Amino acid sequence: MMAEVLLLHHVLGRTKGIEAIADQLRDAGHTVHVPDLFEGRIFSSLEEGLGFVKEIGFKEVTARGVRAAGDLPRDVVYAGFSLGVPAAQQLSQTREGARGALFFHACLSTSEFESQWPDDLPVQIHAMSEDPFFVEDGDINAARELVASTNHAELFLYEGKEHLFTDSSMPSYDADATKLVIKRVLEFLA
């Protein structure tokens, strides 16, 4: 059975690299929605993207991601890349009927939201083992807690220190690691 996926982009916007991942999932027969939370703006550096996000507010970006699910059916897989993870995780944890969750480059403590992680909701978390954002900001601990607290959670750590390594439009792109990420995601969606 094919999945319907809501894929939320990172701090650089809906880049060609994000679209490329969505296309790979579509090529496998899945329906993928990639809302533009930045209304067409794309940034070339994390600093520029973060500057924009600070202007509109992190809460507003998350709210836009949550609103993007409004017209979708309930049985969706929520996927987020870095900045897109808070909305994907909130939807996964609080919107009834979620089929699964995919978190790339980030993970929050389940205590961020006013509910427990749903018992039977499968989740995959993908990040590089030495990504300073993932490790030093505590995401790796949140990911390990999530894996320990539920039956259907997997944390995949890839060798390296790049943050947005799955985005082919970025200098940080790691083709080999991303190929493995896509393979694991497609197995998860199947």
Image (spheres, rainbow, N blue to C red):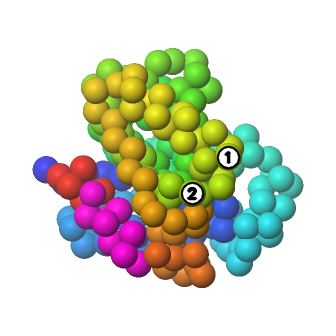
Determine the secondary structure under disc 2: loop
Q: In this view, does 180 lie to the left or right of 72?
A: left
Q: Mark 2 points at which residue?
A: 130
Give 11 or 6, whichever is nearer the viewer: 11
* Relative depth, front residue between 79 and 3: 79
Identify the residue shown where x is 44% and y is 30%. 146
Going from the N terminus, do you reach mark 2 or mark 1 first? 2
**Is residue 75 positioned above or below 19 on the image?**
above
Residue bearing the label numbered 1: 136
Does residue 46 lie above or below 92 as drawn?
Answer: below
In the picture provided, is 128 more to the left or to the right than 53? left
Please determine whether, in this image, residue 142 is positioned above or below residue 171.
above
What are the residue bounds of the magenta stretch?
Answer: 175-184
Please report contact status of discs 2 and 1: CB closer than 8 Å, yes or no: no
The picture places residue 25, in percent across and down from the top left corner, at: 30, 66
Q: How crowded is mark 1: few (under 14 residues within 10 Å), some or many (20 or more)?
A: few
Please tell me whether the stretch drawn in magenta is mainly helix, strand or loop. Answer: helix
Tell me the kind of residue under disc 1.
Glu
Q: Three-letter amino acid code at disc 2?
A: Glu
User: Does any portion of residue 90 appear in the rendered image?
Assistant: yes
Whole-percent x, y for residue 180 in the image? 31, 66
Secondary structure found at label 1: helix
Residue at the spot x=46%, y=34% of the render? 144
Instruction: Kindly identify the residue that appears in the image at 13 percent across and 50 percent down.
Output: 1
Give how far across and how far down residue 63 sits, in percent.
65, 41
